[in-house]
Amino acid sequence: MEQIAHEIKSVMLVYFSGTGGVKRIAETFRFNLSNRGITVIENNLDLSIVNCNRYSNMSVDQIILIFPVHAFDAPDPIYRWIENTGITGDRIAVISVSGGGEVWPNTGCRNNCCRALEQKGLTVSYERMMCMPSNWVFNINDHMAMWLLRIIPDKVNNILDELLCGKVRRTKYKKGPFRKLITKLEKQNTAKFAKELAIDDNCTGCGLCAAHCPVDNIELRVKKPVFKENCIMCYRCIYNCPSHALKSKSFMVLKNGYNLTAVERRMKGIELEQVEKCCKGLMWKPVRKYLLKIEK
């Protein structure tokens, strides 16, 4: 890794967080940066698609872009921000977040994003993967989830230490035709994902799903949500529905939901199992290494 002297007095945090994991990481970045006396400008792309244009001409010393891995790539709100931003010449750190770590087919999840940033005139000087409890397909145990939550401050501080001392960390991966194919197919199917959701009789018409959809894909008609074809499959409407009224047949949606605060409540006062015990198996090897801080 190269090292380039770079004084950082101001940082823009740009992030998208479908179900809350990335938001927790972003909040930790904001807290730790403020504690270091660094001015933080926060651009939360979760709130609305109009936030893609916020601070478009502002100059800062460093941008930190954080996103959940989606279809082994960055989600659409990130590309929307890149397309609309007028910021040029600034250094940017790209932090991807996944439930499985830096492992195939997640490898290369930042490639297209970094390329798009560089085409806009931004200097990508740093890349890193962070891990959070998986919100799709794999329902991990509470002990493993708590380890991933507890290690966030250490990982964030490590990244900030490297950024502030000017460390350059770039990763090169082979594109791989199969990974590119599944990425393309998944993104094609994403837009219509919400159309397949069923709404049961528990729906109260509260409108929470429509109000919090990050891409305005949901309308409330006769007190029932109606889905358009602009879904980004963030699962926010499903997991955050207070009545649990939205149902999906997809194997990717966790049947027991996804609520990090509920995990913390369940685990309050309980001593955590050792990482090697609660995070065992070949599939979780990258996450185990991440938790045990065995990284290059």
Image (spheres, rainbow, N blue to C red):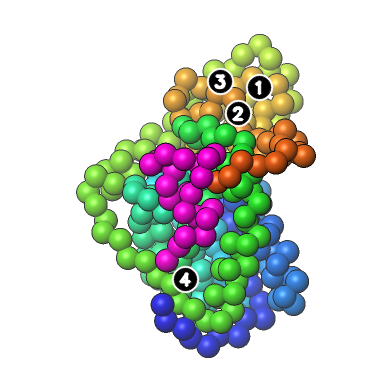
Task: Check whether the beta carbons of the residues at disc 2 and disc 1 lie within 8 A of each other.
Answer: yes
Disc assigned to residue 257? 2
The quarter of the picture where residue 213 lies is top right
Asked if marks 4 and 3 touch (Cβ < 8 Å), the reply is: no
Q: Of tags 4 and 1, which is closer to the observer?
A: 4
Name which residue lies at 66% across and 60% down. 153
Mark 1 lies on residue: 244
Calculate the distance from the C-alpha at mark 4 to the C-alpha at mark 3: 39 Å
Does residue 207 lie above or below 150 as drawn?
above
Local secondary structure at mark 2: loop
Nearest the viewer among 289 and 34 is 289
Between the C-alphas of marks 2 and 3, the distance is 11 Å
Give the residue number, with chain letter if any, for mark 3: 247
Q: Residue at x 47, y 71 (%)?
A: 126
State the predominant SS element of the stretch in magenta.
Answer: helix
Alpha carbon of mark 1 to alpha carbon of mark 3: how far?
A: 8 Å
- Of labels 4 and 1, earlier in sequence is 4
Residue 58: quarter of image = bottom right
User: Going by the image, does 288 lie left or right of 187?
Assistant: right
Q: Can you say which quadrant of the picture contains the C terminus?
A: bottom left
For the residue pair 81 and 183, the one nearer the viewer reads as 183
Q: Are marks 2 and 3 in contact (CB under 8 Å)?
A: no
Residue 79 lies within the magenta run: no
- Label 2: how many residues lie within 10 Å, few (<14), some (14-19) or many (20+)? some
The residue furthest bottom is 5
Q: Amino acid at mark 4?
A: Tyr
Q: Please rate how many residues cluster around mark 3, counting C-alpha atoms within 10 Å: few if below 14, some from 14 to 19, many from 20.
A: some
Q: Which residue is mark 4?
A: 126
Residue ranking furthest to the top: 201
